[in-house]
């Protein structure tokens, strides 16, 4: 698949999810080479901003080696259009990837493992795929290393006892990224074959109907963030109108550098 580097990450440049779906559904593929990691990452504007913070430098250096990096945010595509020579054909949102992928997984009936944010999501997905195994961890802060380690140990034990090809993580950034990287490191150290880790955030909540996605017109205009802000103003205000303003200088730098 063609890839275009923006913000230091090789985004997949494709008109739709077709090729990505085909590769995911034929996993396991030949082992990842070099620094490449068996990850599906879908950075949006908020994640691009956070990954470029000095405190997340080590995380950024690893995530950018994910096998699949999809441009989830429409502003990322807009910046690519301004560079003229590195245009991304389309936004490839994780929330648009999951439904057709899940449909294929359910038809196949093969077991998968999922780390989810609530029992309500698990109930809906388990009804659609009885072979699905899952874990809903208690809430913990990113700073709580002992809680994170316990969760890593739980997931590792589950995957050893019940091997799967696909592991879906839906705990949001950076929890899901840290879990996936720790598990990849442990599996490699043990010489085990690696599943594909899909970092899809809130995609499962949208699919389960627990959260409503923005109308298509919002998505096409790159205003999906406004719909989410209006739905959860207290939680989203700081993210969109304070923290994510740092995307503007990153975008300007990206355009001028080319």
Image (cartoon, rainbow, N blue to C red):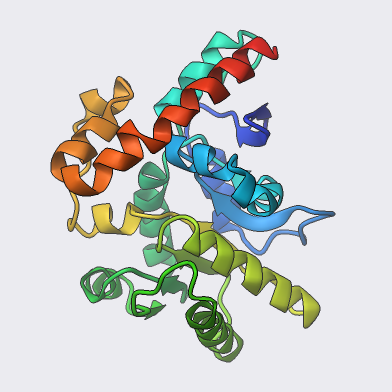
Residue at the spot 57% in from the left edge and 64% down from the top edge: 178
**Residue found farthest to the left:** 231
Residue 64 % position (x, y): 67, 45
Give the image quarter of residue 179.
bottom right
**Horizontally, is 71 left or right of 39 in the view?**
left
| Residue 115 drawn above or below residue 70 | below
Along the horizontal axis of the image, is 177 left or right of 188?
Answer: left
The vertical placement of 163 against 176, above or below, is below
Horizontally, residue 56 falls left or right of residue 112, namely right
- Point out the image quarter for the C terminus: top right
- Picture residue at 80% right of the left edge, 54% below the top: 35
User: Does residue 224 lie above or below 25 as drawn?
Assistant: above
The N terminus: image quadrant: top right
Q: Give percent across and percent down for residue 71.
A: 51, 34
Residue 195 versus residue 4 in the image, above or below? below
- Does any portion of residue 93 appear in the rendered image? yes
The x, y position of residue 52, in whole percent, is 60, 39
Left or right of residue 126: residue 158:
right
Q: Would you say residue 90 is visible in this rendering?
A: no
Residue at figure coordinates x 49%, y 43% from the top left: 47
Tell me where residue 26 appears, x and y as whole percent.
60, 58
- In the foreground, 25 or 117: 117
Count of numbered circles in the view = 0
**Residue at the extreme right:** 34
Q: At 20% from the left edge and 34% from the top edge, which residue is drawn?
A: 227
Of 205 and 6, the residue lying toward us? 6
């Amino acid at each position: 698949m063609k890839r275009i580097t923006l913000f230091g990450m090789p985004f997949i440049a494709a008109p739709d999810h077709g090729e990505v779906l085909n590769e995911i559904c034929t996993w396991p593929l030949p082992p990842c080479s070099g620094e490449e990691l068996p990850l599906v990452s879908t950075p949006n504007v908020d994640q691009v901003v956070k990954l470029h913070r000095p405190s997340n430098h080590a995380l950024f250096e690893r995530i950018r080696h994910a096998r699949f990096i999809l441009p989830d945010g429409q502003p990322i595509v807009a910046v690519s259009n301004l560079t003229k020579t590195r245009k991304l054909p389309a936004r490839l949102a994780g929330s648009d990837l999951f439904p057709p992928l899940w449909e294929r997984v359910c038809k196949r009936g093969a077991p998968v493992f999922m780390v989810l944010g609530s029992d309500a999501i698990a109930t809906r997905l388990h009804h659609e795929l009885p072979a699905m195994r899952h874990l809903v961890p208690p809430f913990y802060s990113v700073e709580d290393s002992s809680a994170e380690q316990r969760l890593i140990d739980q997931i590792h034990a589950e995957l050893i006892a019940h091997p799967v090809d696909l592991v879906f993580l839906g705990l949001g950034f950076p929890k899901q990224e840290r879990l996936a990287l720790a598990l990849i490191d442990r599996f490699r150290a043990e010489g085990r074959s690696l599943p594909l880790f899909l970092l899809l955030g809130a995609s499962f909540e949208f699919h389960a109907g627990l959260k409503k996605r923005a109308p298509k017109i919002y998505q096409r205009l790159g205003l999906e963030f406004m719909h989410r802000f209006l739905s959860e103003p207290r939680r989203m205000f700081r993210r969109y109108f304070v923290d994510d303003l740092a995307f503007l200088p990153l975008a300007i730098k990206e355009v001028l550098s080319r």
